[in-house]
Amino acid sequence: MKINMLLAKTLILQILPNSIIHEFENGKEVVFISSEIKPDLILMDIQMPEMNGYEATEEIRKIDNQKDTPIIALTAGTIVGEKEKCLQAGMNDYIPKPIEKENLKKIISKWIAKT
């Protein structure tokens, strides 16, 4: 997980050099802190301890100031229906691992202006 986080962070900073990136170890932290900082975008790993990405997304969507924040799933799961499961949980989009820079850039551009 640390390597995937480092890769995602590195690619995001190449795409959006002035980004402020917050990293969290588990889904509960994401839910708690995202209501405080109101991020422009959340890259949500599906497999996290304490609360997985689906559960964290569902909880984030219950927070008034987070209903419209784009949440992008990051998952190694290539199971048929995985993307649909992410969207059903309230995520806006899906990026399979390993993360490819051009795909990440395209998805971020779709959800954030000026990329």
Image: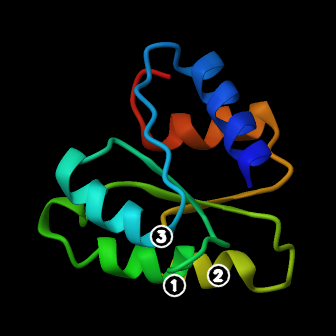
Which residue is at 31% across, 44% downward? 39
Q: Which mark is residue 27?
A: 3
Count residues near mark 2 (Cα–Cα under 10 Å), then give few for <14, some for 14-19, many for 20+: few
* Vertical arrangement, residue 81 with respect to residue 73, above or below: below
Q: CA distance from mark 2 to mark 1?
A: 6 Å
The secondary element bearing badge 3 is classed as helix
Q: Are marks 1 and 3 in contact (CB under 8 Å)?
A: no
Give residue 74's quadrant in the image: bottom right
Could you give the CA–CA distance between mark 1 and mark 3, rounded to whole angstroms? 18 Å
Residue hosting label 2: 84
Q: Secondary structure at mark 1?
A: helix
Residue density around tag 1, few if under 14, some if 14–19, many if 20 or more, within 10 Å: few
Amino acid residing under circle 2: Glu
Residue at horizontal 70 percent and vertical 36 percent from the top: 6
Task: Return the mark for residue 88.
Answer: 1
* Residue 45 horizontal/vertical position (percent): 62, 62
Q: Position of residue 8 (x, y in %)?
A: 68, 38
> Quick one: quadrant of the N terminus?
bottom right
Which amino acid does the dot numbered 1 rest on? Answer: Gln
Residue type at mark 3 is Gly
